[in-house]
Image: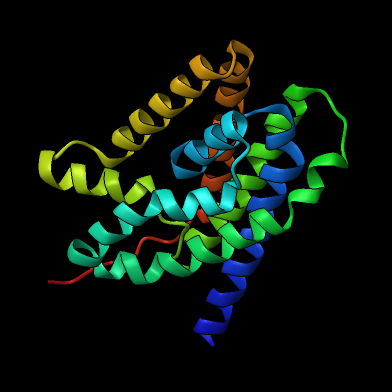
């Protein structure tokens, strides 16, 4: 039964994520962090498919996961593939809405965060730079949350420099919205572990 719930979480989480990207972020050249953010930069600059780029950019990270974090690999590969396909399938949504860019950043970030949070609640994700941050944390003992924030900040800064200052500002708003929505949905009771 848990596998069915997990599969539904991946499907619905991917749909929410894809709506956030296609209906709200992409039409206004707004970025998210991580692999999705890099994929959006490549889309804005070269008109490449966002989902396909997410898969291609994730290959080195998933190779690392295969050798170092097999549990992470198996829990994230489905989320990556399903969300990437749905992102590219829902591309027609980009032409349906016309709202102020700041609202698009807030609402789009919330949709992305809801999708990510739903997947995280069932111990799955879209993979990406979270694993890279975990690997760096293991090697350096830095806080993994700080590393994720640093990676996302670098991606958004690069995107802002390559695309526009407006992209930078709106992306900061979107990432804040993603973080709030993800935290709200992914809350779990802490399990006690015994050694």
Q: Residue furthest bottom?
A: 1
Q: Residue furthest top?
A: 165
Name the residue: 59% across, 14% down: 164
Looking at the image, is 35 positioned above or below residue 11? above
Q: Is residue 194 above or below residue 136?
A: below
* Residue 194: image location, x then y, percent: 18, 71
Query: Taking 142 as reference, is 180 left or right?
Result: right
Q: Can residue 50 be seen?
A: yes
Furthest residue in direction front, as rendered: 46
Residue 133 occupies which quadrant of the picture?
A: top left
Tell whether 159 sits left or right of 28. left
Q: Nearer the viewer, residue 72 or 66?
A: 66
Residue 185 visible in image:
no
Residue drawn at x 67%, y 46% is: 111
Q: How is the image coloured?
A: rainbow
Q: Where does residue 27 sit, x and y in percent of width and height?
A: 74, 33
Front-most of residues 79 and 163: 163
| Residue 137 location, quadrant | top left
Q: Nearer the viewer, residue 84 or 135?
A: 84
Q: Is residue 106 above or below residue 96?
A: above
Count how many numbered circles sit on residues in the image. 0
Query: Which residue does the image show at 62% across and 46% down from the upper left?
Result: 112
Rendered location of residue 65, percent (x, y): 26, 61
How far across and down, in percent of the image, does residue 4 sit?
A: 57, 83
The answer to whether residue 37 is above or below residue 89 is above
Image quarter hosting the C terminus = bottom left
The quadrant of the image that shows the N terminus is bottom right
Front residue of this view, candidates 66 and 190:
66
């Amino acid at each position: 039964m848990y596998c069915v719930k997990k599969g539904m979480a991946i499907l619905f989480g991917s749909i929410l994520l894809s709506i956030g990207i296609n209906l709200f972020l992409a039409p206004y050249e707004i970025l998210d962090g991580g692999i999705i953010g890099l994929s959006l930069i490549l889309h804005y600059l070269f008109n490449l498919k966002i989902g396909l780029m997410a898969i291609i950019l994730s290959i080195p990270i998933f190779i690392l996961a295969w050798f170092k974090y097999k549990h992470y690999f198996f829990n994230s590969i489905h989320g990556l593939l399903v969300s990437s396909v749905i992102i590219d399938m829902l591309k027609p949504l980009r032409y349906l809405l016309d709202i102020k860019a700041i609202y698009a950043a807030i609402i789009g970030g919330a949709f992305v965060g809801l999708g990510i949070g739903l997947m995280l609640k069932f111990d799955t994700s879209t993979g990406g730079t979270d694993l890279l941050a975990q690997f760096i944390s293991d090697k350096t003992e830095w806080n993994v949350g700080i590393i994720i924030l640093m990676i996302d900040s670098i991606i958004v800064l690069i995107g802002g420099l390559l695309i526009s200052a407006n992209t930078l500002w709106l992306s900061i708003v979107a990432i804040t919205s993603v973080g709030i929505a993800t935290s709200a949905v992914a809350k779990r009771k802490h399990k006690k572990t015994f050694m």
